[in-house]
Amino acid sequence: MKYNKLGTTDEEVSVICLGTMTWGEQNTEDEGHEQMSYALDQGVNFFDTAELYPVPSRAGTLSRTEEIIGTWFEKTGNRDKVFLATKIAGPGPYTAHIREASEYSSQNIIDAVDGSLKRLQTDMIDLYQIHWPARATNFFGKRGYYHSEGWSENFGMILETLQEIIKSGKVRHIGISNETPWGFMTYLKHSAAKGLPRVMTVQNPYSLLNRTYEVGMAEMSIREKAGLLAYSPMAFGRLSGKYLEGKDNPASRLNKFDRMSRYNSENSIKATQKYYDIAQENGWSLAQMSLAWVNQQKFVTSNIIGATSIEQLKENISSIDIEIPKEVVKKINAVQEIYPDPAP
């Protein structure tokens, strides 16, 4: 395994981070436990979850993923071997089952932290993240910015609340997710001006089918030392190659969840075929190449992988051993020129 420093800290986290959002929906508790044990044995010391998980989020399974992680900690005693990250869900019509008022109020943040701690069976969270902005921006499937009114600036309040939680010993570091360059810089500005906790990571989507992070955000991550935690590096399974090979089934994510239709666009499928061909030419699976691409980006702190089977997990973790040479990078970039970010 390889490791990177987390933000401006001395914490070393594995370049591969274990994603957990399928546990409790597509995966059972036993399967989740098996994945955690295997990943830890391979040197993966970074696990990421959220109070919202599993996906799709619904009342019947809400926060089941955190509970599964908690029972594994209780069973194995491995809490001290894991750098643990989770998130608070923000406002939106799809979060009414989480809490009655879903905005990022101080009390909601405090309650969310306490709820996660209880489910995770721990007294401390290593990285606590704001799952998405309270303002309407950075929507799935849209490249541009569409301005809307009705949002009250809340960066300072969020950071002040998190500062108190950090002082209490319940959280160590903070991060943001699904953010824009303006939001990223505004958090940093408030932290610097008021001596508030500093954002150490940004968890946004990044894959061969969505390289929009490279525009604006990548430079900020490098210069401000707050690296990307890349999620959906496999484009919800599109970049596994199984859909091209006819190895998918009705339970496969893109067949099961309609809201991920951006990965089913014509250009996404065409681009995937070209990436598949490049991987085959070099003796890699498409999954290995897709993940290796993310692993070696300078602005990436960790690559969040998820799997619904232990076989997939083994293949995904093995991507850490692949270094894509410059001549192959040129071929990958040539595909991006033809089909730029078909799944934003």
Image (spheres, helix red, strand yellow):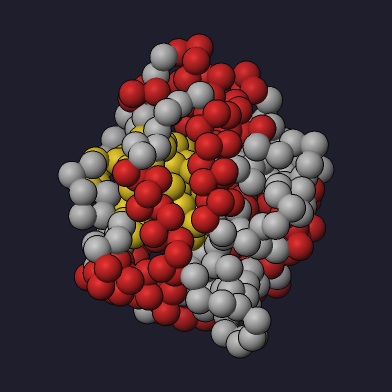
Most distant residue in the left direction: 10
Residue 226 lies, with reference to residue 56, above or below; the image says: below
Is 18 placed left or right of 4 in the picture?
A: right
Quarter of the rendering containing residue 21? top right
Q: Nearer the viewer, residue 248 or 3?
A: 3
On the image, the x and y values in percent for residue 288 come to 45, 46
Tell me which residue sits at (37%, 30%) in the image: 82
Q: Residue at x 21, y 49 (%)?
A: 9
User: Where, by quadrant of the figure, is residue 342 drawn?
Assistant: bottom right
Dividing the picture into quadrants, the one containing residue 1 is top left
Q: In this view, does 221 lie to the left or right of 294?
A: left
Residue 187 appears in the picture as rendered: yes
Residue 118: % across, % down:
55, 28
**Taking 283 as reference, is 43 above or below it?**
above
Can residue 208 be seen here? no
The correct choice, above or below, for 61 with respect to 189 in the image is above
Q: Where is residue 296 in the image (x, y as percent from the top left)?
A: 30, 55
User: What x and y, as percent, mark residue 160?
Assistant: 39, 59
195 and 236: which is toward the camera: 195
Please give the count of numbered marks on the rendered protein. 0
Residue pictured at 66% horizontal, 32% vertical: 64
Q: Which quarter of the image is occupied by the C terminus?
A: bottom right
Residue at 32% from the left image edge and 44% from the top image edge: 167
